[in-house]
Image (cartoon, rainbow, N blue to C red):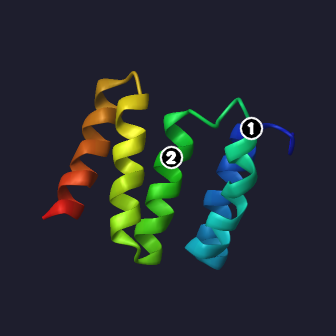
Amino acid sequence: MTGNAVVRLNQAVAVDMAYGPRAGLAMLAPLDEDPRLARHHRLAAVRAHLLELAGDLAAARAGYEEASPRTTGDPERRHLRARIARLTS
């Protein structure tokens, strides 16, 4: 189960909750090379969220902007656009 890209993405979120956003971000780098997630909105959205928690608001906003057009779901897109708007103001 640890070889599954989505499981590893979820593990990065759990590591963030236990050890902080920088620890979670460190787990995301290998997923950039995984073709199952490399262009997926979830990877970009999780990275943006962890960057936001780490205080890197400009990079977080850029991450949400990267994730938004990748999703096919309107509710997810609205959520991502709301985060962009919040970080822009």
Left/right of residue 24 with respect to residue 75 in the rendered view: right
Residue 40 position (above or below residue 54)? above
Label 2: which residue?
A: 44
Q: Residue at left 64%, top 66%? A: 24
Q: Nearer the viewer, residue 85 or 15?
A: 85
Q: Secondary structure at mark 2?
A: helix
Q: Nearer the viewer, residue 84 or 13?
A: 84
Rendered image: mark on residue 34: 1
Quadrant housing the C terminus:
bottom left
Q: Nearer the viewer, residue 74 or 60?
A: 60
Left/right of residue 18 with respect to residue 61 in the rendered view: right
Q: Residue at left 40%, top 63%? A: 59
Q: Residue at left 33%, top 57%? A: 61
Q: Position of residue 82 (x, y in %)?
A: 22, 48
Q: Residue at left 37%, top 49%? A: 64
For disc 1, the neighbor class at 10 Å (few under 14, some 14 to 19, many from 20) is few
Amino acid type at image mark 2: Ala
For disc 2, the neighbor class at 10 Å (few under 14, some 14 to 19, many from 20) is many
Residue 55 position (above or below residue 87)? below
Q: Badges 2 and 1: C-beta atoms under 8 Å apart?
A: no
The CA span between labels 2 and 1 is 13 Å
Q: Position of residue 47 (x, y in %)?
A: 52, 56
Q: Secondary structure at mark 1?
A: loop
Amino acid type at image mark 1: Asp
Q: Nearer the viewer, residue 19 or 65?
A: 65
Upstream in sequence: badge 2 or badge 1: 1
Q: Position of residue 45 (x, y in %)?
A: 46, 47
Q: Position of residue 1 (x, y in %)?
A: 87, 39
